[in-house]
Amino acid sequence: MLEALLGPTDSPLVGSAHSERTLMVWSFFALGKEHVTELPVFEEGPVRIEVVGTKHGVATILDKDVLVYAIGLLQDRVTRGEAPSRTVTFKAADFFARTGRTVCGTAYDWLEQSLDRLKGTVVKTNIEVGDDVDHAEAGGSGRRRRGRTKGFSWISDYEFGYVLEGPGGEKQISSVAVELHEWVYKLLTHNGKILDYNNRYFDLSLLGRRLYELARAHASAQAPCFRVNLERLRLLAGSSAELKEFRRMLQRAADQEDLPLIDYGYRIIDPLLEATRVLGAEKKGRTPLKAYEVVFFHKSARDTALTNPLDVPPLPSGAITVGG
């Protein structure tokens, strides 16, 4: 690691920030800034994710900026025809500039704390990566499933160089070397579903960043819009808010901006109201909160999605390889 700091760095980030689709689809990070040492266990279908931190706390969606930035630097290497590596080196000043942070003492402190959380957070999941996984083996009269649960931290190691400035010897980080964990690195190099981020991603709110990732991961040229149940969306977003409050948060952002997620928008849909509208009837009764749907759309499909929102295809469970 030390040699990486002494040589040239991978920064500045030339292209866009990037991430891998699996890291965008599932809930791995704390959504708020509050200090928590574990997240509620995430379970949907066969997918299971447990996240536990140390005294430094669980890695947050803001700490994920470091991973997003590092993945962008790896993608820069690939674009230049160079071999990627688990170790990424960068200048702290470039990281701050690309992620919209003011260069100051508190920013350097936050970066060091963020690296501690990324290294200390332990993720246990049955999501598998690589091309060497045997999912079932013959036995007796049929086939039996075999599964794996992997435990890992986001980064295996980190190191930074710093300078002391001012009469009080204030420490300012200059160069940073981050070694991605093997699970993360294999996810990037074996699965190969790397997606770019709009550069304005770092201007979004914490919830906005998470919703943008879901929209970016699921909306494609072939299917530019999708809908998801409100309660399931809260689970995928990793929000701990009550369902009523979560709907209010979504509604407020949608009311303030036509496309609150930069290239994407969403609308909260009352399915009973939509059904009666189509039939030309009058709605009777109150719609339970759990029945509400949220329609996401790329800006190019806005009119299509909002004309007949109930015709928008529901969000699939996701093509993910998991253990038994």
Image (cartoon, grey):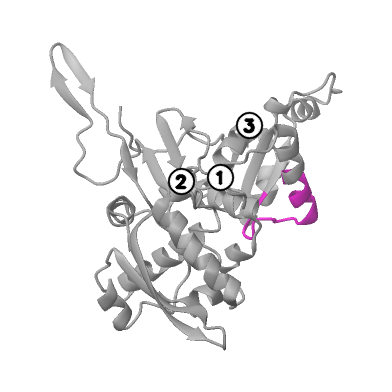
Q: What's the mark number on residue 53?
A: 2
Q: Amino acid at mark 1?
A: Val
Q: Specify whether residue 60 is in view.
A: yes
Residue underneath mark 1: 36
Query: In the drawing, does residue 151 fall left or right of residue 244?
Result: left
Residue that extends furthest to the top in the rendered view of this protein: 141
Residues drawn in magenta: 250-265
Q: Amino acid at mark 3?
A: Glu
Is 81 above or below relative to 137?
A: below
Seen at 45% across and 42% down, the residue is 52
Rounded to the nearest angstrom, the CA distance separating label 3 from label 2 is 26 Å
Q: Tell me residue 191's x, y (percent).
A: 31, 50
Quadrant of the image containing the C terminus: top left
Rounded to the nearest angstrom, the CA distance separating label 2 from label 1 is 8 Å
Helix, strand or loop at mark 1: loop
Badge 1 density bin: few <14, some 14–19, many ≥20, Cα 10 Å:
some
Helix, strand or loop at mark 3: helix
Q: What's the mark number on residue 231?
A: 3
Q: Tell me residue 228's x, y (percent).
A: 60, 36
Q: Are marks 1 and 3 in contact (CB under 8 Å)?
A: no
